[in-house]
């Protein structure tokens, strides 16, 4: 197994983290499309916000790894993460009130 993984460097791992974050982030649109098609109308499922939050966090970690070069990504992710977290908070507050 060591020979198979010998080509894998730290940078390869970080690239996989970066691509993984982007894949997670992009998945939110497929979740939203699927739920909307099921409902026959535009729907914003809670899973959309979880995929947004997860993808944003992973992308933020990757951009921090990049250092100064990743600063624009860091700034973009920080604003988005606040929005995603706030939407989840509002959703769960509303559910708690309804219960």
Image (cartoon, rainbow, N blue to C red):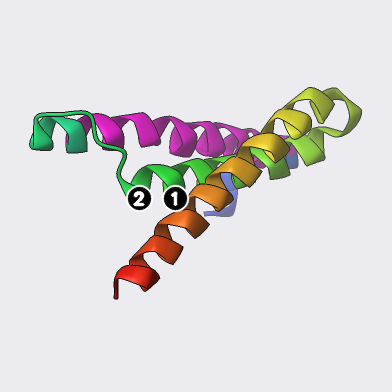
Q: Residue furthest front?
A: 97
Residue at 49%, 41% in the rendered image: 52
Q: Is residue 78 above or below residue 42?
A: below
| Residue 4 image point, x, y percent | 53, 44
Q: Is residue 75 visible?
A: yes
Residue 92 or 57: which is nearer the viewer? Answer: 92
Would you say 74 lies left or right of 98 here? Answer: right
Look at the numbered discs 1 and 2 and tell me whether their residues touch, using CB distance below 8 Å.
yes
Would you say 52 lies left or right of 56 here? Answer: left
Secondary structure of residue under mark 1: helix
Q: Residue furthest right?
A: 68
Residue 50 tag number: 1
> Gap in Å between the C-alphas at discs 1 and 2?
7 Å
| Residue 13 image point, x, y percent | 64, 41
| Residue 29 image point, x, y percent | 35, 29
Magenta-colored segment: predominant secondary structure: helix
Find out whether residue 26 is within the magenta segment.
yes
Secondary structure of residue under mark 2: helix
Would you say 1 lies left or right of 13 here? Answer: left
Residue at 11%, 37% in the rendered image: 39
Residue at 47%, 55% in the rendered image: 90
Please state the extent of the stretch shown in magenta in the rendering: 11-34
Which quadrant is the C terminus positioned in?
bottom left
The quarter of the picture where residue 30 lies is top left
| Residue occupied by mark 2 | 46
């Amino acid at each position: 197994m060591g020979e198979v993984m010998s080509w894998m460097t730290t940078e390869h791992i970080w690239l996989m983290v970066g691509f993984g974050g982007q894949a997670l982030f992009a998945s939110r649109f497929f979740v939203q499309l699927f739920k909307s098609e099921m409902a026959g109308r535009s729907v914003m499922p809670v899973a959309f916000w979880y995929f947004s939050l997860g993808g944003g966090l992973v992308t933020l970690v990757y951009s921090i790894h990049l250092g100064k070069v990743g600063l624009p990504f860091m700034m973009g992710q920080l604003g988005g993460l606040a929005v995603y977290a706030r939407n989840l908070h509002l959703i769960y507050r509303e559910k708690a009130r309804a219960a």
